[in-house]
Image: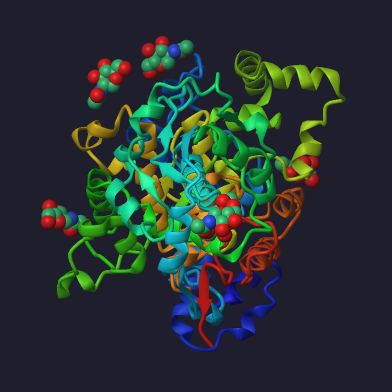
C-alpha cells in the first residue's frame, strides 16, 4: 500500500490502486480533506494530547532527579515542525488503510538458524585440574549501574577462570550517582549463579576468614582500573595479576568494568563469559514477580510464551493464555530514550530549546562536569551544529518519533518507554506523545504500592525496564553506546530465535537525513530511514573485538544450524 505516498509527492501512483475501489475513493477523499486541514488537525490532536500528558506523564519530569531548579516549561520544543506535520499526515493515512509496519518482524529468515549454545559444561577433568592448581581468591567490587555491573560480573568470571582462582561473589559499590545499596543477592539469584557455573569456576559466597582482615592496599593486592589497560589482553593478567595472586593468595579488583578485552581470547573463556551473561544471571523472584505483572499489564493480559520470558521471568511467567485472551495478542514496542539531563548536558549539543535551554545546560555542566568545562576551555570547541552533523548528539524524543514514523509504525502503536527521566519532560516529550499517544512507563502501569519496594533502589527499578525491553515485540534504541540497549539487544539475539528485532538508528546518517528537514519529501524520508535501519539490522557475526554480550552470534556463544 505504498501507493498513497504518491499523494503528496505528485499523484503519480494513482494507477496502482485497483482493488477495493470503493474504499480507495473514500480514503482518497479523506486524505485530501486531511491535507487541507492538516495543520488544524495537528493542532487539535496536539491539544488533546497535551491535556492527557499533563495528567499522566508527570513522572517523566526531570524536576525530581536532583537536576536543580528548572522553570515551568509547558510549551513544546520542536526542531522539525514540517517533518512532524508530514509524519502526522502519514500516520493518519495509515490509520485509515490499517497498514502495519513491516518492522515488527525481523528481516532475515537466516536468523532463526542461530541457537543459544553456551550453556554446556566444561569437561570435568579440566576443572579438576584448575581447582587443584588453585591460585587464590579474586574479590571484585563493581561500580556503575545495573548493566555495567553485569558486564563486570561476567568479566570477573572469565578472569577467575583464566587465573585458576576462586571467585568471591562480586560486591557492588555504592555510588551517589546510582544511589543504590543493592548487592548481588538483591538482584540476582546467588545459588543459581553458583550452580550454573559449578563446572567452570569455583565460586564462593565469602572470602575465607583468614583473608578478611587483610589490608589489601597495604599488601599490594588492591588493583584499580588505573592498574589495568582498558580491554586488557589475557597476557596482561598473567603478567601483572597472577604474581600478586600467587604471592598473597588474594586480589581485590576495585571498580572493575570493561577491563577484559573481547579479542583475542580463548574459545573456552569466550564461551564462559557468554554462559555467565546468558545463563547464570537470573533476577531474584522479587524482581521477576513485579516484572511479570508489568508485562501482563503492558500486554493487556494476553501472553506469549517465549524463551525470553522463560529466561527473564522464571516461575513468574504469565500463565498460558486462555482461548479468549489468545485472540488479542497485544504487541508492544519498547523504546529506550537516552535523553536524561546528564546525557544532554554532557553532549554539548543544542536541542531547539533556545537561549534558555543553552543557559540551563551550561549551568548544569558547571555544577556537575567541571572536568569537561576545563577541557572545553583548553581546546577549540566543536560547535553544536558540527557535533550534530557528526552524529554525536543524543536523539531527542522528537527525533525518535520521526524515526518510528519513518519506519511506518502506526499511531496506535503501544510503546513502553524505558528510563523515563526525560530532560524537560513535557516539552521535549510533546512531539513524541502527539504522534504516538499510547506511551506508557512502569510508573504508569504499576501502582505506588507495587513500586514502593523498589523505590530506593535504582538498579532494581532498572531491572524492570531491562525485562520489559527484552520481552518486547520490537525494541527501538536511540543510543547504541548505552549499556542497557546493548545488553538487552544481545539477549534478544540470543534467546529471540530470530524473531526479536532491535531497531537502531545510525546517528550520523540520521543527522544527515534530518538536515534536509525543510525540503525532503516524506516518501523520500521514509525510504532513507528504512535503508539506514535495514543496513544496521543486517545479520552480522560478531566482529573482532566486539562485545559478545551485545553480539552473541559467533561460534563460542551460539550455534548455527545448517
Ligand atoms: C510552576 O508551577 C507550579 C504549579 O503548577 C507553581 O506552584 C510554581 O510557582 C511554578 N513555578 C514557576 C517558576 O513558575
Ligand atoms: C591453570 O590450570 C591449568 C590446568 O591445570 C593449567 O594448564 C594452567 O597453566 C593454569 N594457569 C595458571 C595461570 O595457573
Ligand atoms: C599447575 O599449573 C602449572 C602452570 O602454572 C603447571 O605447570 C602444572 O602442571 C599445573 N599442575 C597441575 C596439577 O595441573
Ligand atoms: C486483566 O486481568 C485482571 C485480573 O485477572 C483484570 O482485573 C483486568 O481487568 C484484566 N485487564 C484487561 C485489560 O483485560
Ligand atoms: C526511601 O528513602 C527515603 C529517604 O532516603 C525514605 O524516607 C523512604 O521511606 C524510603 N522509601 C522506601 C520505600 O524504603
Ligand atoms: C533543518 O533544516 C534547516 C534548513 O535546511 C537546517 O539549517 C537545519 O540545520 C536543519 N535542522 C537540523 C536539526 O538538522
Is residue 38 in view from this perspective? no
Residue at 70 percent of width and 63 percent of height: 528
Say which quarter of the image contains residue 523: bottom right
* Along the line of sight, the residue nearer the viewer: 80 or 189: 189
Q: Position of residue 6 (x, y in %)?
A: 65, 72
* Along the line of sight, the residue nearer the viewer: 99 or 218: 218
Say which quarter of the image contains residue 53: top left
From what the image shows, is residue 300 above or below residue 165?
below
Q: Position of residue 101 (x, y in %)?
A: 50, 69
Drawn side of residue 329 relative to residue 154, left or right: left
From what the image shows, is residue 352 above or below residue 292?
above
Is residue 367 in view from this perspective? yes
Residue at 81 percent of width and 31 percent of height: 383
Q: How is the image coloured?
A: rainbow
Residue at the extreme right: 380
Name the quarter showing ligand 2.
bottom right
Say which quarter of the image contains residue 309: bottom left
Drawn side of residue 234 relative to residue 250, left or right: right
Drawn side of residue 426 relative to residue 203, left or right: right
In the picture, the quarter occupied by the N terminus is bottom right
Q: Position of residue 67 (x, y in %)?
A: 51, 19
Residue at 51 percent of width and 53 percent of height: 161
* Along the line of sight, the residue nearer the viewer: 224 or 412: 224
In the picture, the quarter occupied by the C terminus is bottom right
From what the image shows, is residue 23 above or below residue 458?
below
* Along the line of sight, the residue nearer the viewer: 64 or 496: 496
Q: Position of residue 341 (x, y in %)?
A: 55, 28
From what the image shows, is residue 251 above or below residue 478?
above
Number of numbered discs = 0
Amino acid at each position: 500500500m505504498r501507493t498513497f505516498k504518491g499523494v503528496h509527492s505528485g499523484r503519480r501512483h494513482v494507477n496502482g490502486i485497483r482493488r477495493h475501489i470503493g474504499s480507495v475513493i473514500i480514503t482518497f477523499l479523506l486524505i485530501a480533506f486531511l491535507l487541507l486541514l492538516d495543520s488544524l488537525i495537528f493542532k487539535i490532536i496536539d491539544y488533546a494530547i497535551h491535556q492527557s500528558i499533563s495528567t499522566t506523564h508527570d513522572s517523566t519530569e526531570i524536576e525530581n532527579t536532583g537536576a536543580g531548579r528548572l522553570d515551568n516549561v509547558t510549551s513544546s520544543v520542536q526542531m522539525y515542525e514540517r517533518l512532524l506535520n508530514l509524519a502526522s499526515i502519514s500516520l493518519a493515512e495509515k490509520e485509515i488503510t490499517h497498514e502495519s509496519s513491516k518492522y515488527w518482524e525481523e528481516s532475515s529468515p537466516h536468523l532463526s538458524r542461530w541457537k543459544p549454545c553456551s550453556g554446556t559444561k566444561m569437561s570435568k577433568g579440566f576443572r579438576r585440574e584448575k581447582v587443584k592448581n588453585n591460585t587464590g581468591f579474586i574479590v571484585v567490587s563493581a561500580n556503575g549501574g545495573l548493566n555495567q555491573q553485569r558486564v563486570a560480573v561476567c568479566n570477573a568470571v572469565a578472569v577467575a577462570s583464566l587465573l585458576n582462582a576462586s571467585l568471591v561473589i562480586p560486591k557492588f559499590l555504592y555510588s551517589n550517582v546510582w544511589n543504590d545499596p543493592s548487592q548481588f543477592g538483591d538482584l540476582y539469584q546467588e545459588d543459581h549463579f553458583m550452580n550454573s557455573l559449578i563446572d567452570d569456576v569455583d565460586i564462593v559466597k565469602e572470602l575465607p576468614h583468614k583473608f578478611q582482615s587483610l589490608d589489601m592496599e597495604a599488601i599490594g593486592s588492591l588493583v584499580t582500573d588505573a592498574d589495568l589497560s582498558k580491554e586488557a589482553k589475557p597476557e596482561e593478567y598473567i603478567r601483572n595479576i597472577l604474581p600478586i595472586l600467587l604471592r598473597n593468595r588474594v586480589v581485590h579488583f576495585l571498580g572493575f568494568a570493561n577491563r577484559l578485552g573481547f579479542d583475542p581470547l580463548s574459545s573456552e573463556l569466550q564461551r564462559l563469559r557468554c554462559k555467565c551473561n546468558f545463563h547464570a544471571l537470573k533476577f531474584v523472584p522479587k524482581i521477576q514477580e513485579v516484572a511479570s505483572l508489568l508485562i501482563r499489564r503492558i500486554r493487556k493480559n494476553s501472553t506469549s510464551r517465549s524463551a525470553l520470558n522463560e529466561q527473564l521471568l522464571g516461575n513468574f511467567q504469565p500463565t498460558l493464555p486462555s482461548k479468549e485472551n489468545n485472540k488479542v495478542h497485544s504487541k508492544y514496542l519498547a523504546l529506550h530514550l537516552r535523553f536524561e539531563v546528564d546525557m544532554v548536558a554532557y553532549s554539548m549539543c543544542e536541542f531547539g530549546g533556545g537561549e534558555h535551554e543553552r543557559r540551563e545546560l551550561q549551568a548544569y555542566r558547571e555544577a556537575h562536569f567541571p572536568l569537561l568545562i576545563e577541557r572545553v576551555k583548553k581546546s577549540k570547541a566543536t560547535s553544536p551544529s558540527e557535533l550534530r552533523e557528526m552524529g554525536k548528539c543524543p536523539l531527542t524524543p522528537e527525533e525518535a518519533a520521526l524515526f518510528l514514523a519513518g519506519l511506518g509504525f502506526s499511531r496506535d502503536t503501544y510503546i513502553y518507554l524505558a528510563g523515563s527521566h526525560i530532560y524537560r519532560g513535557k516539552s521535549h516529550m510533546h512531539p513524541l506523545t502527539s504522534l504516538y499517544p499510547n506511551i506508557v512507563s512502569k510508573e504508569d502501569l504499576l501502582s505506588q504500592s507495587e513500586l514502593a519496594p523498589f523505590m530506593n533502589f535504582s538498579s532494581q527499578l532498572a531491572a524492570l525496564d531491562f525485562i520489559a525491553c527484552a520481552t518486547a515485540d520490537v525494541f527501538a534504541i536511540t543510543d547504541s553506546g548505552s549499556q542497557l540497549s546493548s545488553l538487552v539487544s544481545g539477549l534478544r539475539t540470543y534467546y529471540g530465535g530470530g524473531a526479536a528485532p532491535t531497531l537502531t538508528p545510525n546517528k550520523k546518517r540520521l543527522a544527515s537525513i534530518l538536515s534536509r528537514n525543510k525540503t525532503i519529501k516524506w516518501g523520500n524520508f521514509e525510504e532513507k530511514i528504512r535503508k539506514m535501519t535495514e543496513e544496521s539490522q543486517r545479520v552480522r557475526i560478531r566482529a573482532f573485538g566486539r562485545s559478545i554480550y551485545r553480539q552473541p552470534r559467533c561460534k563460542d556463544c551460539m550455534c548455527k544450524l545448517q
